[in-house]
Amino acid sequence: MLDLDALLREGATLTVAYGPGERGACNEDGFVVAEPYDGIYYAVVLDQDGLRIAGGSGRSGGEAVAALRPERVAAAGALPDDPPF
């Protein structure tokens, strides 16, 4: 479990933002040229150095914050040990 209060006390920042989604679009012949998708809220926690340490998303700002999960961050210049899958 992520201790958000402790991270914020230690100087981390929490940003919550909204991505408005897309209404979709059709061309003059009625063919879909852009698929619609719903808007979504994003929450990101950055440490004092600006490295991303947690992220989450949801249908509301509160849901995005509740969905925050720690992310593994490699040290600057280091390569991760695990493959990307």
Image: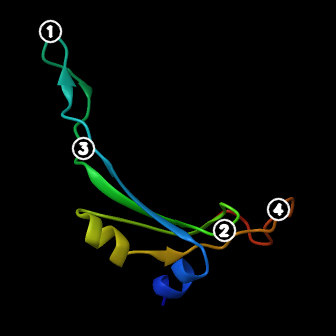
Label 3 crowd bin: few (<14), some (14–19), many (20+), radius 10 Å: few
Q: Is residue 68 left or right of residue 61?
A: right
Q: Which residue is mark 4?
A: 76
Pinpoint residue 59: horizontal percent, then vertical percent.
23, 62
Asked if marks 3 and 1 touch (Cβ < 8 Å), the reply is: no
Give the mark, 2 or 1, whose residue is nearer the N terminus. 1
Pinpoint residue 74: horizontal percent, then vertical percent.
76, 68
Q: Residue at x 53, y 67 (%)?
A: 13
Q: Which residue is mark 1?
A: 28
Q: Amino acid at mark 3?
A: Tyr
Q: Residue at x 87, y 59 (%)?
A: 77
- The numbered dot on residue 37 is 3
Pinpoint residue 34: horizontal percent, then vertical percent.
27, 28
As helix, strand or loop, the secondary structure at mark 2 comes to loop
Asked if marks 4 and 1 touch (Cβ < 8 Å), the reply is: no
3D distance between C-alphas at marks 3 and 2: 34 Å
Q: 12 and 23: which one is in front?
A: 12
* Above or below: residue 9 compared with residue 55: below
Q: Is residue 8 visible?
A: yes
Q: Which residue is mark 2?
A: 48
3D distance between C-alphas at marks 2 and 1: 51 Å
Asked if marks 3 and 2 touch (Cβ < 8 Å), the reply is: no
Q: Amino acid at mark 1?
A: Glu
As helix, strand or loop, the secondary structure at mark 1 comes to loop
